[in-house]
Image (cartoon, rainbow, N blue to C red):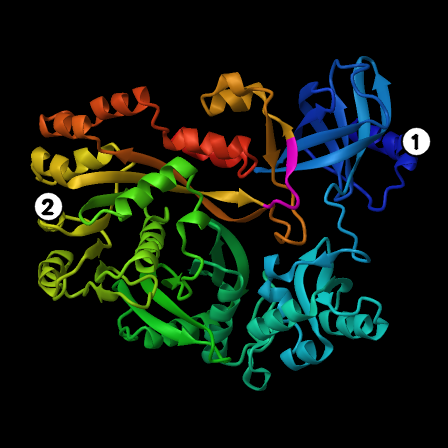
Amino acid sequence: MKHEQSKTLKTGPVAAENRDKSRELVSGWRATVFQENSITISNAGIEDSSSSGAGLMIAGHAGVIDKDVKITISIEANHRRFTRQAKVRWVLVEGGNVRFGVEYLDHVGFDPETHVLDIALLRIDPVCALKIPGNIALRQKVLPFIELDGIINVVCLNIENHAVITLLERLLKRQVRLWAGDARQLDVKLRQVYGDVSHGVKALPSPGVQVAQVANAVNTGDELLYAAYMRQASDIHIDPGYNGATIRFRVDGQLEHYSQINSHIFTELVSRLKVMAYLDIAEKRSPQDGRFSHQFVSGERRVDVRVATLPTKYGERITMRLLAVQTESLTLENLGFEPSHKLMIEAFLRRIQGLMIMTGPTGSGKTTTLYAAIRMLLEERKVNIITIEDPIEYEINGIAQCEVDSGDKVSFAKALRSILRHDPDVVMIGEIRDKETADVAIKAALTGHMVLGTLHTNSAAATVTRLTDMGVEPYLVAAALRLAVAQRLLRRLCTHCRIPRPLTELEAISIDRSELAGRVIHDPSGCIYCGGKGYSGRIGLYEVLELREDWARAVADGEGESELVVKMRNSGVKSLLDDAIDKLLAGVTSVSEVVQIASSW
């Protein structure tokens, strides 16, 4: 019956849509429809869909949808969700049910003939960029940067150059769309991408295809690192399987499938990476850890890589963490602090002693925030700063950075005791892991040093509990601890393509704020600037606990986390969830990101 209904729709009303792509029947897709008059229709069924529109059915809602009205439609399909603005092209009422077809609208409105791209904001896809030789890209002044809907978008100087279009379509074997860009910005980006073309990297294979044609593991490893660097990935995952290995990148906290390699190339690649990281290539049955620094061919770009191996059924799994070496953007202004939080942290950093601890799970950006604090200290006054890290994640000129040794020759506690004899003004401890390190850190904070550290807890108030559980006396915690900052990371919406819509009642309940139903929020969409993802970068969430004198006295008397949380809330100190909701209402992030915080709160 469904098939017959679809055929009926295609022969009648669909003709009015001027549909440019045929739709496919779908099942299990549901949609929420938002109209301009704020009427919300939930649980609408999607019957057929394409990249340009969809056919929907709403049971028992005759007369609710009118032709030619503009709507916002949020679709849940196969464990993914996307939002589009659309226009109703036809409406068909059958027995109380309403069927209607929508055509998606381009709410971004970028016209290749008139819009000049801000090249500095583009997220370059290495698969597209490295499909053409660097010498051709530099000579023709062209840069393929993203493929959307089967079309490769290319930024260039002259969009009217038909010879360039012909050349690119022959090389890329895809239809191309040219965008204009600033000549200076394009030159900078071309040098960043292609570097020294006489020794440049070769074109990378497209994701999802075998790369058996790659001749050796050296080129494969170099190309993989370069692609991850261009994609601004934080991690590379190489997972062996029965027929080879899957390569994935972690970008903005999310895993992206990159490509497949066959078993032969995988074996050679593992050996190559283990040699680079100074690991034992003969040892395949025990986990190993190492690191190396990789210089790209242009000589101007370098990335530090931390490598971990793990034996699995089909071979050694490789995970590589890419550690940034550029720190110019590490400032408190760029991390997402609201003004009151930023003022409290800056006030602490202008002190000469005390303890500030960043808390949160692994990968929540704690160390990045501490580096931003260190940069502020270096800019404002002359101080002797020494850090103890495992590993050193960023290199900053003007400070002494000590790395913990895996053989325990240099532990956090040993290094901390030693550096206190080097007359430091500021000490940064990468992680407070045990009682010995905590004791020395607190005593350093009490004897005239500023101490910055990280700790694994779920909230700022839990910092007190964690330190006392380690065996530190409560009165010492109260005397030394001045600030505890809990942190998380959420993906930041792309400002070019985000779509406004009302918050539904169910969503408001899911984030424990039912009174916010109907408030305007934004959903991700996707455009050429964000690479079709809808998100661009990440932003921090913060909960800042300033241990006031009366609160410190209560901690010294033995009050725990629960009592401290009550004091914080009664005093108006915002929680991580409060900060997330503020950023949701400001259009900085989406409700799906905030739900992750609410579910763990």
- Circle 1: element type: loop
Q: Residues within 10 Å of mark 2 (few under 14, many from 20)?
A: some
The CA distance from mark 1 to mark 2 is 80 Å
- Please state the horizontal and vertical placement of residue 152, each as a whole percent of the image: 72, 61
Place residue 501 in its image quadrant.
top right
- Quick check: is 257 in the magenta stretch? no
Q: Label 2 is placed on what type of residue?
A: Leu
Residue drawn at 45 percent across, 50 percent down: 334
Q: Earlier in the sequence, mark 1 or mark 2?
A: 1
| Residue situated in front as seen by the camera: 566 or 592 | 566
Count of residue discs: 2
The residue singled out by tag 2 in the image is 446
Q: Residues within 10 Å of mark 1 (few under 14, many from 20)?
A: few
Front of the two marks 1 and 2: 2
- Quick check: is 496 in the magenta stretch? yes
Quadrant containing the C terminus is: top left
Query: From which residue to which does the magenta span run?
Result: 494-500
| Residue situated in front as seen by the camera: 209 or 248 | 248
Residue drawn at 70 percent across, 18 percent down: 39
The residue singled out by tag 1 in the image is 12
Asked whether, in this view, residue 402 is left or right of residue 76, the answer is: left
597 in relation to 158, above or below: above
- Please state the horizontal and vertical placement of residue 368, each as a whole percent of the image: 36, 53
Asked whether, in this view, residue 593 is left or right of residue 330, the answer is: right
- Circle 2: element type: helix
Q: Residue furthest front?
A: 381
